[in-house]
Amino acid sequence: MAGISSNSTRASTDATASRPSPTGGRLPLLDVLRGVAILGTLMTNVWIFATPGSEWAFLQGAPMADPFEEPAEALFRFLADGKFLSLLTILFGVGLAIQYDSAQRHGTPWPRGYRPRALFLFAEGTLHFVLVFGFDVLMGYAVTALLVARLLVRSERLRRVLMWTSVSLHVALMSLITLALLADDSEPRQVSAKSVDLYAHGSWLDQIGFRLENAVALRMEPVVTFGLLVFLFLLGVRLYRAGAFAPTDRGRRLRARMALWGLGLGIPFNAALTLGGEDFFFLGRYVAAPVVALGYMGLIGVVLDRGRLPAPVTQGLSSVGRTALSSYVLQNVLCTLLCYGVGLGLTERFGPDGGPWWVMAMWALICAFLIAGSTLWLRRFSHGPLESVQRWALRR
């Protein structure tokens, strides 16, 4: 009986400790994960900027890297494509759960008190889409957050049902799209010379006008993947409440399982789809990649738990994570200035014939700039530039 009592007490203590702090203290792992997600998202986006025709070229079916002809580029893209975007989406769900807990502590009405934040995020995303990048994620996150915020005051059972229903419908949709691509025997479309010329020689206002004219097509990704967004947001809520990010024994066990199952199942599945060719793009990016993202999340947690990440690296990633919104927008601004004709025009200068190495080098340099810049900024300010603007606007 004494042994049973001791075990019960230990389990109860561990379960209590695994819950988020009632005082709302920061969880260091989350800042590191956000930093990794931001820099990892750039690993995918940088190829869009470096491709002649940029955003429109990808909608027209810009060719993927052949793993046998360009192994370095193919591996680089494989490690990133869809994984870090899914990781970022899960972390948005985690952030929503944290804000809900904060609202509960301060007696703020929910979800009414959250709506201004989501609407402001939508406005920021709209500006980012129009002025900088056609594949903005903030607008989709804002709309999803408005829905999931309402679900946080409903029962766990309802959230679980909606979570698995949304991902089931999403997988079915991606499967149907894949079957349609396999059945389509038409020749791949060529990237239009007009879009290539636009990004190589057009003005900034020309690019803005082009995005506005083609807004429906450029905004289709969050519409088509809305089921996945809902699922990943709710998954983030569940992981947070289960203590997956807490510095406890329970949290460490959960992170180890996420790494084992996410990488063990996701990487072989994703690799098989990648080798299958471009027809399996949707299943790879929007079905297999989120599984790998869970593995990445767990692996990063395990590495931090074991103290295997050097302190300067941890601090740099954490700084990017604490300025995630500013870093996300800034990295796309930098890519615009480096790749398009309104800046240095590196895409036209190097292009596909320049090989993949200049693109990888550009990614590394931008990452280094973001890490150094965010670290220096946070020595003087407590929040990133856009984060500060957001806080000021919401206070007013």
Image (cartoon, rainbow, N blue to C red):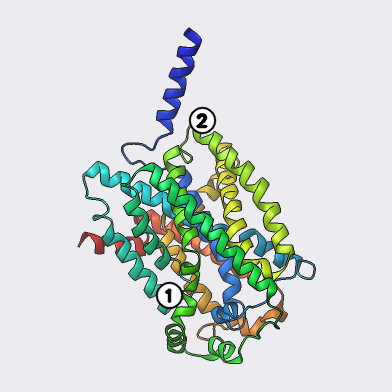
Q: Position of residue 237 (x, y in %)?
A: 42, 47
Q: Is residue 196 above or below residue 264?
A: below
Mark number displayed over residue 129: 1
Q: Work out whether residue 280 or residue 182 is closer to the camera in this orientation and state it.
A: 182
Q: Is residue 373 above or below residue 64?
A: above
Q: Position of residue 171 (x, y in %)?
A: 57, 59
- Residue 259: which quarter of the image? top right
Quadrant assignment for the C terminus = bottom left
Q: Earlier in the sequence, mark 2 or mark 1?
A: 1
Q: Bin the neighbour count of mark 2 within 10 Å (Cα to Cα): few under 14, some 14-19, many 20 and up.
A: some
Judge left or right: residue 129 versus residue 191. left
Q: Position of residue 204 (x, y in %)?
A: 45, 86
Judge left or right: residue 262 versus residue 109. right
Mark number displayed over residue 249: 2
Q: Bin the neighbour count of mark 1 within 10 Å (Cα to Cα): few under 14, some 14-19, many 20 and up.
A: many
* Number of numbered discs on residues: 2
- Residue 146: which quarter of the image? bottom left
